[in-house]
C-alpha cells in the first residue's frame, strides 16, 4: 500500500480557542512494499502523522492517499473501516492493550472484530503467534503472566493476525533488552520481505534506520524537512545535529577517524566499516 | 570504604513460581559507589531493586542498608535512605504541579512547611527544573518528567538513588541528559550519594564505577566496566549489548586483523586504528 501525503495539515481542537497546530504542509510518499523509517525528535509530529495512517484522526487540511483510499478533511471516520482492515498499527508499549483471559483469545480479538468466524480467527491467531515465536504451550496462558518481551510479542501477534498489508511500528522495541530488540527487528525485516509488506517504522534508533530502511522521512516542527535514502539523510551530519538527530554509530566512528586523517568511503553499518578498515590495515577484506 | 548495601545469600521467589527470581545472591556496595546492574529482561535485576527498599521481602537471606536491617519494622527508615525512580515516569506522578509532586514525599513524612518549601526548591534546582515548578507534570517531556522524579527522590535526601531502567523510555537526547545529570549529582555530592542504576543502556552502564551482571537470578560477574565489557561473547550469551568498539574489534579479528585483547573505549579504538594505519 503506497502512501501519499499532499499538503496535509492537522490542527487539534480546530475552531476552538484551544486550537493547536499538530501538522502543517506535510508532503511525502512512502513506496509500496518498502521499509520506510520516520525520524524526528520528540514532539516533531511523527506520532500525529502516524495516527492519520490508520484513520484515527482525519486531516484538517490537504489530502492523504493510502492505496485506493483518499482521505480529505470531509472524510467520515466510518468510510475508512475497509482500509483499516489492511492497516496494522503497533503502538508504543502495545502490551498495555492486552486484555483477554488467554493469549490465544487476545490475538483472536482483531480478526473476529473484522468479521472473521471463530475458526478462521483461531487459525489466523495461531499462525501469528508462531510467526512471532510464541510456542503453542502459551496459547492457553494468561497474557499477564508472561515476561515483558513475551507480552510485547503477543500484542504484535494481535496485529499480525489481521494480516495487514501496511504495518506501522511506533518504537516497537522500546524498553526491551538488546537481544529482544534484535529479535523483533529481524522479525519485522523478514515479514516485510516475505509478505512484501509496506512497513513504516517510527524510531529514534538510527542503527535500525541504517540497517533496514529503504526510505527515510524526517519530521521537525510538524512538517517533513527531508526525505530520501538513508545514505542521503545521514550524509549531512551538521544538519542532523541541528535537528537533534543522531548519526548511526558506524558513521560517527568513521567521522572520528576522518578527523585523525583516516578517510573512508561513506559507511552506515559496522560491516562496511570493518571491510574498509581491514583493507587499510592489510587484512583479508570481505569475509562474511 | 564503608559498605552501604549488603546482601547476604538473598533468595527471592515470586508466589506461584517454580524457579526463584534471585538465587543465593551476595553483594556489597560501598558508600558513594555508582554501580550499574545489567541483565536481560526477566533476569532478576528489578526484583533486586525492589528488595532494597522493602517493596518485596526476601524469601531467604539478609539485606542491610547502612547497617540497618531491611525488615518490616525498619521499612520506613529504609525508605528514607533509598529513593527509587522507575521506568515509566507517568506511573509515579501524583501532584497537580511539579512542585506539589516533589512535595508529596515530604508531606508524607510530616516535614514542616518552611523546610518543605526550601527542600522542594533545592531539589528542583538540582535537576534544572526550578523554572517548571508550577507546570502540570503531564505536559512535560519524558526527560523532564524523569528529572522531576529524581527531584522527588532527592527532596527526601536519601543515601541511595536507585534508577530502575529510568532511561529506557526516553529518546536519545533525554537519555544523555539523564546520564549527565547523574554525573553532576555524583560530582557534587560525592560519597553522600550512592547510585544504583539498573539498565540495558551500555552508555549508562559504562558511566558507572562498577558493573554487576545478573542472569536468570544468578550474579554472574562484578567488575569495572572495562573488565566486564571486554568479554563480548559472554555479554552476548546473556542477551546484553556489546559496546561498539568491541563489536568492531571482533569484526576486524574475523577479517584476519590482529587487534588488542584488552578493552578499548571508542576513543581508544579510534586512536589504535589511526596509529596502526598511519604506520603501515
Image (spheres, coloured by chain):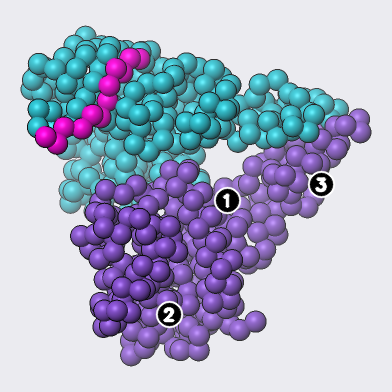
In the rendered image, which quarter is residue A54 located in? top left
Q: Which residues are magenta?
A: A17-28
- Same chain for the residues at labels 1 and 2, yes or no? yes
Q: Which mark is residue B25?
A: none
- Is any atom of residue A264 visible in this view? yes
Provide the residue designation for mark 2: B81
Classify 10 Å Cα crowding around label 3: few (below 14), some (14-19), many (20 and above). few
**At x 60% / y 57%, what residue is drawn?**
B207
Q: Horizontal and vertical percent for residue B174? A: 44, 47
What chain is tagged by disc 3? B
What chain is tagged by disc 1? B
Provide the residue designation for mark 3: B260
Colour for chain B in the figure: purple
Q: Nearer the viewer, residue A122 or B84?
A: B84
In the rendered image, which quarter is residue B53 located in? bottom left
Colour for chain A in the figure: cyan
Q: CA distance from mark 3 to mark 1?
A: 21 Å
In primary-sequence order, the first of circles 1 and 2 is: 2
Q: Which mark is residue B203?
A: 1
What is the total number of numbered labels drawn onto the structure image?
Answer: 3
Q: Horizontal and vertical percent for residue A180? A: 46, 45
Q: CA distance from mark 2 to mark 3?
A: 43 Å
Amino acid at each position: 500500500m503506497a502512501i501519499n501525503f499532499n499538503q496535509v495539515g492537522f490542527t487539534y481542537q480546530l475552531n476552538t480557542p484551544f486550537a493547536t497546530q499538530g501538522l502543517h504542509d506535510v508532503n511525502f510518499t512512502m513506496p509500496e512494499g518498502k521499509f520506510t523509517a520516520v525520524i524526528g525528535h520528540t514532539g516533531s509530529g511523527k506520532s500525529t502523522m502516524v495516527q492519520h495512517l490508520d484513520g484515527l484522526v482525519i486531516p484538517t487540511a490537504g489530502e492523504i492517499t493510502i492505496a485506493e483510499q483518499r482521505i480529505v478533511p470531509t472524510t467520515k471516520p466510518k468510510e475508512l473501516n475497509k482500509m483499516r482492515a489492511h492497516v496494522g498499527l503497533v503502538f508504543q508499549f502495545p502490551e498495555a492493550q492486552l486484555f483477554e483471559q488467554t493469549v490465544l483469545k487476545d490475538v483472536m480479538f482483531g480478526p473476529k472484530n473484522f468479521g472473521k468466524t471463530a475458526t478462521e480467527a483461531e487459525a489466523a491467531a495461531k499462525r501469528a503467534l508462531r510467526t512471532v515465536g510464541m510456542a503453542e504451550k502459551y496459547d492457553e496462558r494468561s497474557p499477564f503472566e508472561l515476561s515483558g518481551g513475551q507480552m510485547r510479542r503477543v500484542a504484535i501477534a494481535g496485529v499480525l493476525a489481521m494480516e495487514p498489508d501496511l504495518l506501522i511500528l511506533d518504537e516497537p522495541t522500546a524498553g526491551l533488552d538488546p537481544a529482544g530488540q534484535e529479535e523483533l527487528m529481524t522479525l519485522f525485516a523478514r515479514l516485510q520481505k516475505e509478505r512484501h509488506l509496506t512497513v513504516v517504522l517510527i524510531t529514534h534508533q538510527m542503527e535500525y534506520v541504517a540497517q533496514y530502511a529503504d526510505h527515510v522521512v524526517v519530521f521537525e516542527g510538524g512538517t517533513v524537512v527531508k526525505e530520501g535514502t538513508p545514505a542521503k539523510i545521514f550524509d549531512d551530519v551538521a544538519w542532523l545535529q541541528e535537528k537533534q538527530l543522531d548519526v548511526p554509530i558506524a558513521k560517527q566512528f568513521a567521522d572520528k577517524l576522518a578527523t585523525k586523517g583516516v578517510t573512508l568511503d561513506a559507511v552506515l553499518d559496522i560491516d562496511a566499516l570493518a571491510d574498509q578498515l581491514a583493507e587499510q590495515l592489510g587484512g583479508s577484506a570481505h569475509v562474511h | 570504604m564503608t559498605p552501604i548495601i549488603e546482601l547476604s545469600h538473598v533468595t527471592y521467589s515470586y508466589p506461584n513460581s517454580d524457579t526463584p527470581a534471585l538465587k543465593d545472591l551476595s553483594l556489597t556496595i560501598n558508600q558513594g559507589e555508582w554501580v550499574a546492574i545489567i541483565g536481560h529482561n526477566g533476569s532478576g535485576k528489578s526484583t533486586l531493586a525492589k528488595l532494597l527498599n522493602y517493596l518485596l521481602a526476601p524469601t531467604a537471606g539478609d539485606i542491610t542498608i547502612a547497617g540497618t536491617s531491611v525488615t518490616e519494622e525498619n521499612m520506613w527508615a529504609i525508605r528514607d535512605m533509598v529513593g527509587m525512580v522507575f521506568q515509566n515516569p507517568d506511573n509515579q506522578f501524583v501532584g497537580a504541579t511539579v512542585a506539589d509532586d516533589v512535595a508529596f514525599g515530604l508531606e508524607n513524612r510530616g516535614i514542616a512547611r518552611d523546610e518543605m518549601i526550601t527542600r522542594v526548591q533545592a531539589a528542583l534546582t538540582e535537576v534544572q527544573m526550578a523554572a517548571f515548578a508550577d507546570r502540570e507534570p503531564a505536559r512535560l517531556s519524558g526527560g523532564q518528567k524523569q528529572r522531576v522524579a529524581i527531584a522527588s527522590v532527592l527532596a527526601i535526601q536519601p543515601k541511595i538513588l536507585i534508577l530502575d531502567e529510568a532511561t529506557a523510555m526516553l529518546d536519545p537526547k533525554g537519555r544523555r541528559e539523564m546520564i549527565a545529570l547523574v554525573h553532576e549529582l555524583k560530582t557534587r555530592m560525592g560519597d553522600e550519594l550512592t547510585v544504583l542504576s539498573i539498565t540495558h543502556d551500555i552508555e549508562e552502564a559504562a558511566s558507572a564505577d562498577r558493573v554487576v551482571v545478573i542472569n536468570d537470578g544468578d550474579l554472574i560477574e562484578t567488575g569495572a566496566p572495562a573488565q566486564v565489557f571486554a568479554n563480548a561473547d559472554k555479554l552476548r550469551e546473556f542477551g546484553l549489548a556489546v559496546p561498539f568498539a568491541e563489536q568492531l574489534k571482533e569484526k576486524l579479528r574475523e577479517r584476519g586483523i590482529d587487534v588488542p585483547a584488552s578493552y578499548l573505549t571508542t576513543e581508544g579504538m579510534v586512536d589504535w586504528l589511526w596509529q596502526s594505519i598511519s604506520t603501515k
